[in-house]
Image (tube, coloured by chain):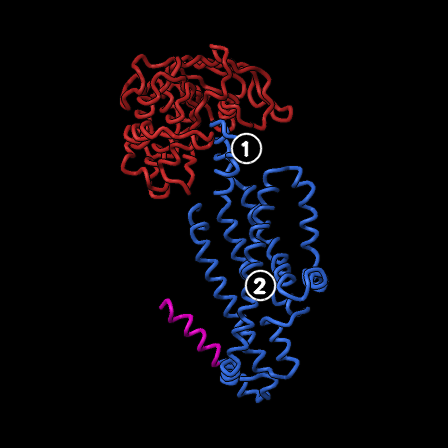
Amino acid sequence: MNAAPEIVVEGGASIDGVPLFAPLSLVLKAGEWTCLLGGSGIGKSTVLRLIAGLQTGAMFDGAIRASDGQPVAPRVAYMAQDDLLLPWADVARNVTLGARLRGEKPDADRLARLLGRVGLSEHAHKKPAELSGGQRQRAALARTLMEDKQIILLDEPFSALDARTRADMQELAVELLQGRTVLLVTHDPGEAARLGQTIAVMSHRSLDHCAVPSSSAPRLVDDIEMLETQGALLRLLRERAA
Amino acid sequence: MRIGAPLAATVFALLLWQGVVMFTGLPRFILPGPMVVAEAWWANRAVIAENTLVTGLEVLIGLVVGSALGAATAIQLASSRTARVLVQPMLVFTQALPVFALAPILTLWFGYGLGSKVAMAVLIIYFPVTSSFFDGLMRTPEGYLDLARTMQASRRAILWQIRVPAALPSLASGLRLAAVYAPIGAVIGEWVGSSRGLGYLMLLANGRAKTDLMFAAMLTLGVLSVLLHLVVRKLTARMAGEAR
């Protein structure tokens, strides 16, 4: 894999002439985690979908560029809150979906290695319905990694999980996504404080960059500085919503 | 219990039938009782078997051809906007026509034999298969499509690897409907013009006041339809269940 690029998003979006978010400038630093925090309906998923080259229903006036000048959309892998595992395909076929869709032969060694790393080696031939919520999300993470893309877009992928599973998944994701440019969209200040190397709070009017704890991500769940950041982020979120 | 409940229901229905016959005292050429019909069935078993084969063949061919045409149409419609604009209104309009009214012209076009009955069965099942599969194809969860697009999948790959498998349960329900409709189509075709088949036998028996034979042929048709429905249900179980 080549070095992951930095991504710059500049511009505003509107739906039928009504502004969704004011012109903003968001920088996803190369090989780092950027957390985009905001309430629902604020347009943070729209930002992510714009980067992914997906339809948004909004008019975007601006530009999305990569530091190396190459196109962005073909280099992203996407993971959503819904695991999006195909119910009729087993775990192995779900994880290799990208290759199968492009008519390529899936890399069996890589598949085995990734399933091992997310702890699903035993479950390769199970259907998604036979897995727990945490296992399903780990399969989705393996599918994201299987794509081997430089830019990873995460749209609240952990928000439907219970607290313990979520903490486990956050750590696993940080470990496995090392070296890639990651955008995590989330409404959870705790998640942003735990994982962000850059944290931006999004509201209709502005995008505020916030101070980040000095320890490296993933921070301990009881890291004092992390908890302070979480508090500060929540305060900011509430002020911006007022 | 699995066999017990249907058995009890059958016995109940037969008793009810016999009760009505005894209570009303209707003559056997108006309403024959179950025993009389059973006797007629046994006495005419060779004729009934021969005609059942004919109708069964018409239904089977109609079902296969109609389902294949319906599924192919649905895929065409789902993959092309032009096809949707041009063909969909026509499809809805033809559905508004009573298919029964077309039976005479089908006999004219396809002849007195197997062809017109198959055509009738095909016509009657084509729309339900097309429309249920098409609905399924147009209702693919958006998330799957987004995921596939970020994977740089072609429209063709998305159609065959995401939309079609996701729509198989809808196709399965269309096929199950088709299994119920196909015998109706074949029998209507036989009524309009034929010299073989259970529908023909029913008309013949009715015309000669052999009401017991008419009932025997009708019940045979009923059993054939139920069996067909069960077989199709079984065949489509994987299709219907897997994508849930």
Q: SS for tag 1?
A: helix
- Magenta span includes B10: yes
Q: Residues within 10 Å of mark 2 (few under 14, many from 20)?
A: many
Find residue A204 and report its horizontal and vertical position in percent.
Answer: 53, 21
Find residue A100 and report its horizontal and vertical position in percent.
Answer: 43, 32
Q: Quadrant of residue A14?
A: top right
Q: Which mark is residue B155?
A: 1
Chain identifier of the blue chain = B
Residue that mark 2 sits on: B58
The span shown in magenta is B1-15
Q: SS for tag 2?
A: helix
Circle 1: residue type: Arg
Question: What count of labels does the image hold?
Answer: 2
| Residue in the image at 59% along x and 88% along y | B27
Find residue B100 and report its horizontal and vertical position in percent.
Answer: 68, 63
Residue A46 horizontal side relative to residue B94, left or right: left
For mark 2, name the chain.
B
Circle 2: residue type: Glu
Q: Nearer the viewer, residue A34 or B47?
A: B47
Q: Nearer the viewer, residue A86 or A170?
A: A86
Say if A239 sits above or below B202 in the image: above
Q: Is residue A167 visible?
A: no
Q: Nearer the viewer, residue B38 or B65?
A: B65
Q: Earlier in the sequence, mark 1 or mark 2?
A: 2
Chain identifier of the red chain = A
Q: Which mark is residue B196?
A: none
For mark 1, name the chain.
B
